[in-house]
Every structure is written in structure tokens, then in C-alpha cells.
Image (cartoon, rainbow, N blue to C red):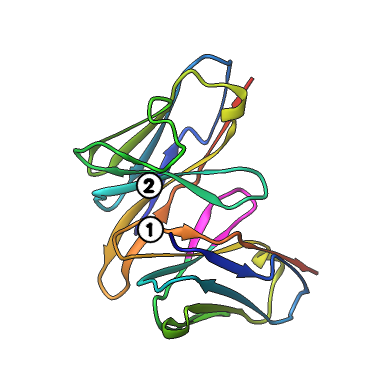
Amino acid sequence: GAVVSQHPSWVICKSGTSVKIECRSLDFQATTMFWYRQFPKQSLMLMATSNEGSKATYEQGVEKDKFLINHASLTLSTLTVTSAHPEDSSFYICSARDWVSGVGDTQYFGPGTRLTVL
Amino acid sequence: GIQVEQSPPDLILQEGANSTLRCNFSDSVNNLQWFHQNPWGQLINLFYIPSGTKQNGRLSATTVATERYSLLYISSSQTTDSGVYFCAGGSSGSRLTFGEGTQLTVNP
């Protein structure tokens, strides 16, 4: 159980285009999902918290008009990188929060999406 | 916000060796998780351990909440254990703050 998928797993796009990344919780409902960004050899940096049915909460320094997040259902959150530029190239990872009886409040992570902007 | 410090940053082992990874927190947390990031980038949940000790096969973890640290033990390491190990902590239901990770290399 507790599987999170991401699509696409990798994408290459031209500068100025927009890219949408989907994050799905496959076998549980997630009222809260998180989006992270990871640069090579670095840790995960939280970009935003996505709550179903409400606006996302962005971390300081993350442009909300650049990184559009929509959490339309209990199993799907999307991240759209608008007008992508080469500096947006990174590894984007989503996670979904689940409360597991006997375990606790746990985040499960998707496999990540590698974005390359030319 | 919470600061998370992991040590060591890099660790190289021979297959079969044991190791201990440490995670220190600047403040109390009631959500603490250990992850393994494989070479393809997938983060795999190892332990949810805000306090106490848990074991899963060759891996075990101990968190001393009152002293704000957690330890991950790897016994009889295998080459497939290679990768980056992250600890992350936060308040229940809230964001997780990640440490910088420990890059583990297990040589045959």
C-alpha cells in the first residue's frame, strides 16, 4: 500500500513553454500533498504544501505565479512550471501524507520528475 | 524553523560492515522519518520513528526524543544499501524538514 505515482518521469522542453507534472496517490486518499525540488547532490527543498480544495501554501522565495499547484481531488495534485527557463531544470518530487494505524503520520514519495529546460 | 543536521556526510564501507548514521534536531519533533534515496531518485520510507526503537531486517533506528537525535543502524551492509540516507522531522501533520543526507557507498 501507500503508493504515489508521478507523471511524467522525465521531460525535456524548450525555454518559454509550460510543463505540467501530475502526482497521484494510488491506494489512499491524501488531503495534503507536498512538492519538493532537489538539485544534484543536494537535499530536498520544500516548495509548497498542497491542500485538497484550497490554495497551496508556498514556501518563502518560491514564486507562486511560476509554479502553479492545483489539488483538485483527494488523489491528484498537479504542479505546472509556467514559462520554464533553464534555471528551472531540476528534479521535482511530490509526496502525499497518510495516517497509517499503528505507524503514524507518514509522507510517501513519488518517483520524481526530471525536468530539463533547453 | 527546525534545523536538521546529519552525520557523517559521506561514508564508504566494505560489504559486510556495520554503520551508524546520526540525525540531530534543533527543536523537538513529533514526526520523524528516515528515507533511502536510490540511484534513480526514488525515496523509500525506512522508518517512522518519533521516539523509541524499531527494527526491520538489517536496519534499525532509535530516536531519543528528549535529546533530539535519532540514529539509523545498518548491519551487514550490502552493495544495494548504497545511496543517500535522509532523515526528516517536523510537527505531526505539517511539513517535514530534511537533513543534508548521508551518501553511503558500499563496496564489494
Residue A51 picture quarter:
top left
Task: Name the secondary structure under disc 1.
Answer: strand
Q: Position of residue B67 (x, y in %)?
A: 47, 84
Residue drawn 30% across the image and 38% down it: A56
Q: Which mark is residue B103?
A: none
Q: Which residue is mark 2?
A: A34
Task: Name the secondary structure under disc 2.
Answer: strand
Residue drawn 65% across the image and 67% down it: B81
The answer to whether residue B30 is left or right of residue B13 is left
Q: Disc 2 sits on a residue from what chain?
A: A
Segment colored magenta = B36-45
Callout 2 touching callout 1 (CB < 8 Å): yes
Whether labels 2 and 1 belong to a single chain: the reply is yes
Residue A24 picture quarter:
top left
Q: Disc 1 sits on a residue from what chain?
A: A
Position of the N terminus of chain A, as image quadrant, is bottom left
Q: Position of residue B36 (x, y in %)?
A: 56, 62
The answer to whether residue A51 is left or right of residue A41 is left
Give the Cα separation between the discs numbered 2 and 1. Answer: 9 Å
Please state which amino acid type lies under the numbered disc 1.
Gln
Please state which amino acid type lies under the numbered disc 2.
Phe
Residue drawn 52% across the image and 21% down it: A84
> Is B30 in front, or is B34?
B30
Q: Nearer the viewer, mark 2 or mark 1?
A: 2
> Is B8 in front, or is B3?
B3
| Farthest residue, direction left | A53
The answer to whether residue B28 is left or right of residue B74 is left
Q: Which mark is residue A107?
A: 1
Relative to A62, say whether B108 is above or below. Answer: below
Residue A91 colored in magenta in the image: no
Relative to B107, say whether B95 is above or below. Answer: above
